[in-house]
Image (tube, helix red, strand yellow):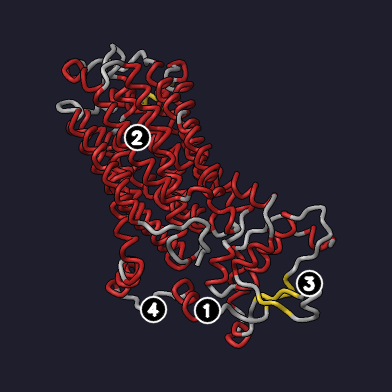
């Protein structure tokens, strides 16, 4: 037991690829999970363990708590990086000389980068490993997000935000695939819901930082020829979570055991299970139940090849065919109907959520004189050239309250996900979200607008949490990250369209984008009823 407890410290597994590759084919054919008989009825016989059984044997405890915190911080860092743009625009629009249309294009550029990055990183995660991709994408996100704070011209700011979005697009889908592959089946729904709540934490962190930093003009200083306003410092601070997450994954986190098994790296997978077991049974004298690795998975010929294979053709056409192969698999056979439904849902919810949410600070700014956002269009147009200073702190306080409104929805999701199931939660929350958005357009006072925005915030987060759970359970390991990357890419198209539509129409016909959001959320809520049930389903 002394040796086992010495393994408590997690070791990165990046350097072990060469060791695994040295296994010859005869040895790989003999590798399987085996458990020595623990029950009296089994005597000295051995029982083969599947991946699901191995996860159950590893237990649930300290390892999963630390995993939740580390993956949650990465998820929060993505939220901070995305939402920071919406908080800085009410002030940065003056320094960068932005019109409403420019602001829409700026936010759309972030989602364009996320769309491209989502599928690219997802594809690499299914071929190269979850951990490596998370480190790379979080690093890209943090570096280029901070560099954007030094941009003095709009085109350069736009480009750097696009590249930052490319990094964000990779970490969002991959983090959920990675996290889910460590979870016991009966706890997966609640744990993924708990992971999703860290998006709320990132939202609150971004809103709180904006409230503390941006109105504080004393933080302004000259950096060469650049007037480094407080909103630029806010952007630098928003990059810290991504960079710190990348460092933690590099130093402490193992590769997904499910990926390692599918890739034929069984020795490394066994070490991960041992670490999980030791950490989850600290203080216990219970021995690790797996005797060793002696044979292969029953479906190795089906599951291992898509993960471990390399692209054989070196020409461009061959690479493109290999890259788009997961998409063809998503829309063939039994996966086609669920993939079509998720395509519609991701587009509609992203158009609605990001199209509206990213504009909340600007809409709150337009309600400062009272009334609803759409009631002040003419006044907003005449004041478009008004100075952004001094900064109105009420805008950031209202953004903070709206972010805080996520909390009840997150708590509800954690408690009810494994009881009600993701499908019912997804459909019902989308329908209620649709109704709340309709009333954002209908209300006539600033207070009513804030209340309805908080209702939308609290209910829509249930939709996202349910979608995170369903997305990980509907697809097999060799397609999971690619599928999530593809669907989040579809969602980015919706987010791009939502921000462009808001940017073009918010000054002239505010009702059109808001009512469009309500209609699309209603549509996605109805389509969600077509999805199969996945409550406590076994990962394939």
Tell me the number on the disc at residue 531.
none
- Contact between labelled residues 4 and 1, with CB atoms less than 8 Å apart: no
Q: CA distance from mark 2 to mark 4?
A: 41 Å
Look at the image and tell me whether residue 517 can be seen: yes
The local secondary structure at tag 1 comes to helix
Residue visible at 43% across and 63% down in the picture: 475
| Comes first in the chain, label 1 or label 4 | 1
Q: Which residue is mark 2?
A: 151
**Tag in front: 4 or 3:** 3
Callout 4–callout 3 Cβ contact below 8 Å = no
Cα separation between marks 2 and 1: 51 Å
Question: In front of the other: label 2 or label 1?
Answer: 1
Residue 223 % position (x, y): 42, 27
Q: Which residue is mark 4?
A: 312
Tell me the residue that label 1 is attached to.
Answer: 300
| Distance between mark 1 and mark 3 Cα atoms | 28 Å
Q: Earlier in the sequence, mark 4 or mark 3?
A: 3
Classify 10 Å Cα crowding around label 3: few (below 14), some (14-19), many (20 and above).
Answer: few
Q: Residue at the far bottom: name it.
A: 26
Q: Report the residue marked by disc 3.
A: 39
Mark 4–mark 3 Cα distance, whole angstroms, equals 48 Å
Which of discs 1 and 3 lies nearer the camera? The answer is: 3
Count of numbered tags: 4
The percent coordinates of residue 379 (x first, y second) are 19, 15
């Amino acid at each position: 037991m002394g040796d086992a407890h010495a393994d408590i410290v997690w070791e990165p597994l990046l350097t072990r690829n060469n060791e695994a590759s040295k296994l010859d084919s005869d040895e790989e054919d003999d590798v399987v999970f085996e458990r020595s008989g623990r029950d009296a009825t089994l005597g000295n016989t051995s029982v083969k363990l599947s991946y699901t059984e191995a996860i159950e044997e590893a237990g649930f405890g300290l390892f999963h708590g630390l995993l939740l915190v580390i993956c949650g911080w990465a998820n929060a860092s993505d939220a901070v990086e995305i939402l920071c743009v919406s908080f800085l625009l009410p002030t940065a629009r003056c320094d960068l000389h932005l019109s409403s249309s420019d602001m829409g294009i700026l936010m759309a550029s972030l989602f364009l980068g996320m769309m491209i990055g989502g599928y690219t990183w997802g594809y690499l995660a299914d071929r190269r490993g979850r951990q490596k991709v998370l480190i790379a994408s979080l690093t890209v996100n943090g570096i280029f997000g901070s560099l954007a704070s030094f941009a003095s011209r709009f085109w350069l700011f736009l480009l750097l935000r696009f590249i930052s979005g490319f990094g964000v697009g990779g970490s969002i889908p991959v983090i959920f695939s990675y996290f889910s592959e460590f979870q016991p089946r009966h706890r997966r729904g609640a744990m993924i819901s708990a992971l999703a709540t860290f998006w709320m934490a990132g939202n609150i962190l971004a809103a709180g930082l904006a409230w503390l930093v941006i109105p504080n003009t004393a933080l302004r200083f000259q950096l060469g020829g650049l007037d480094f306003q407080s909103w630029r410092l806010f952007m630098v601070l928003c990059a810290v979570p991504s960079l710190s997450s990348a460092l933690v994954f590099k130093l402490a986190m193992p590769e997904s055991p499910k990926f390692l098994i599918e890739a034929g790296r069984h020795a490394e997978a066994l070490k991960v299970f041992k670490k999980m077991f030791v950490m989850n049974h600290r203080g216990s004298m219970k021995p690790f139940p797996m005797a060793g690795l002696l044979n292969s998975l029953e479906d190795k010929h089906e599951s291992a090849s898509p993960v471990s294979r390399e692209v054989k053709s070196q020409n461009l056409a061959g690479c493109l065919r290999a890259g788009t192969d997961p998409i063809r698999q998503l829309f063939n056979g039994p996966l086609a109907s669920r993939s079509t439904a998720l395509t519609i849902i991701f587009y509609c919810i992203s158009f609605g959520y990001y199209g509206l949410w990213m504009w909340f600070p600007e809409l709150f700014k337009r309600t400062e004189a009272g009334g609803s956002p759409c009631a002040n269009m003419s006044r907003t147009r005449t004041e478009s050239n008004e100075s952004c200073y001094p900064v109105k702190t009420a805008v950031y306080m209202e953004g903070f309250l709206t972010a805080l409104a996520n909390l009840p929805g997150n708590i509800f999701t954690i408690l009810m996900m494994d009881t009600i199931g993701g499908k019912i939660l997804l459909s019902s929350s989308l329908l209620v979200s649709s109704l709340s958005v309709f009333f954002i357009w209908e209300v006539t006072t600033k207070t009513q607008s804030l209340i309805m925005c908080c209702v939308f915030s609290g209910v829509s987060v249930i939709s996202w949490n349910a979608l995170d759970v369903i997305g990980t359970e509907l697809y097999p390991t060799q397609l999971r990250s690619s599928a999530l990357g593809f669907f989040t890419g579809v969602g980015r198209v919706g987010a791009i369209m939502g921000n462009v539509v808001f940017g073009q129409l918010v000054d002239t016909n505010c009702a059109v984008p808001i009512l469009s959001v309500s209609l699309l959320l209603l549509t996605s809520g109805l389509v969600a009823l077509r999805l199969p049930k996945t409550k406590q389903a076994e990962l394939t």
